[in-house]
Image (cartoon, grey):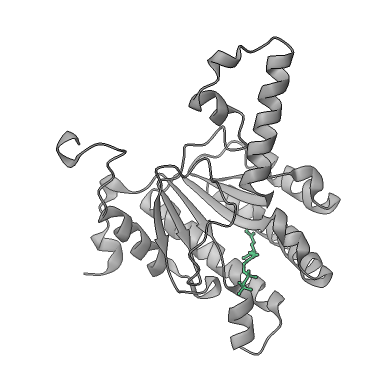
Amino acid sequence: MNLLDQINRENVPGHIAIIMDGNGRWAKKQGQERLYGHSIGVESVRETLTAAKNIGVKYLTLYAFSTENWNRPKAEIDGLMNLLVRTISNEVDELNSSGVRLHSIGDRDGLPQECREELASAMQRTSHNDSIHLILALNYSARWEITRAARLIAEAAQQGELDPAAIDDELISSRMSTADFPDPELLIRTSGEYRLSNFLLWQIAYTELHFTSVLWPDFKEEDLYKAVLDYQSRERRFGMVSEQL
Ligand code: FPP
């Protein structure tokens, strides 16, 4: 039986988040520049999005550019931003016609103007879709987001709009950039690294983690199905005992 047929459609994670890692190493293995790895990585994004949509995933969050990525050589940063702008511009028609709604999380104000504009226009264009939500984490880090939420909450308390005693999980979630999305059930990281790299730290409290040694440009449909099957083999207890489930 192929992998797709083994997936229980009643228990597909509604939200999958992915740390797409290994583009640079993949390119080096091919004797190519790092940017070539990123551009082939876009193929993996396309294939993963299609496969996720087909099995009924409703939210797919991709870590495309972290706040720490600004420390990379300027040529790589410029190349990545260009790739993002070109990809969004080239793909928006197809995303729209296949019912994908595009969102972004992260500090949009810190992105180059062209990138901000392309993103805003694609988000607007696709805003009526709901087959699957594609959430690009751009200029994102979890600590940036948590710090910002703390500031927003403190400001509201200072203005007398909020009683500090009323601050709970739900209120904090509502001040995160992911406020409109459910928490991920499954987080995947490629390239054999076992780190969370400042990604969705608040939202992954109960998320199942799947690590694979596959480098992102090699990540294909089957690799997504393997991750989902791994997820389906786990028992999610949320702090309870098996008998309570
Ligand atoms: C990590 O590999 C990858 C990135 C920092 C960028 C990922 C971006 C893309 C795949 C393009 C995304 C495009 C869209 C439209 C979402 P790395 O460079 O850290 O690889 P390494 O660890 O081997 O050096």
Question: Where 62 sits versus 145, above or below?
Answer: below
Quadrant assignment, res 40: bottom right
Depth check, front residue: 93 or 119: 119
Classify residue 234 as left or right of residue 23.
left
Quadrant assignment, res 83: bottom right
Question: Where 103 sits versus 24, above or below?
Answer: above
- Which residue is found at the position 57% from the left and 55% from the top? 62
- Residue 153 lies, in percent from the top left, at 66, 23
- Outermost residue to the top: 160
- Residue 71 lies, in percent from the top left, at 77, 63
Viewport quadrant of the C terminus: top left
- Which residue is found at the position 35% from the left and 57% from the top? 228
Q: Quadrant of ligand 1?
A: bottom right
Depth check, front residue: 157 or 175: 157
Asked if one can make out residue 105 in the rendered structure from this viewpoint, the answer is no
Asked if one can make out residue 31 in the rendered structure from this viewpoint, the answer is yes
Viewport quadrant of the N terminus: bottom left
Question: Where 191 sits versus 154, above or below?
Answer: below
- Which residue is found at the position 45% from the left and 59% from the top? 188
- Outermost residue to the left: 243
Quadrant assignment, res 63: bottom right
Classify residue 79 as left or right of residue 46.
right
- Outermost residue to the front: 165
- Residue 217 lies, in percent from the top left, at 55, 73
Q: How many marks?
A: 0
Depth check, front residue: 74 or 9: 74
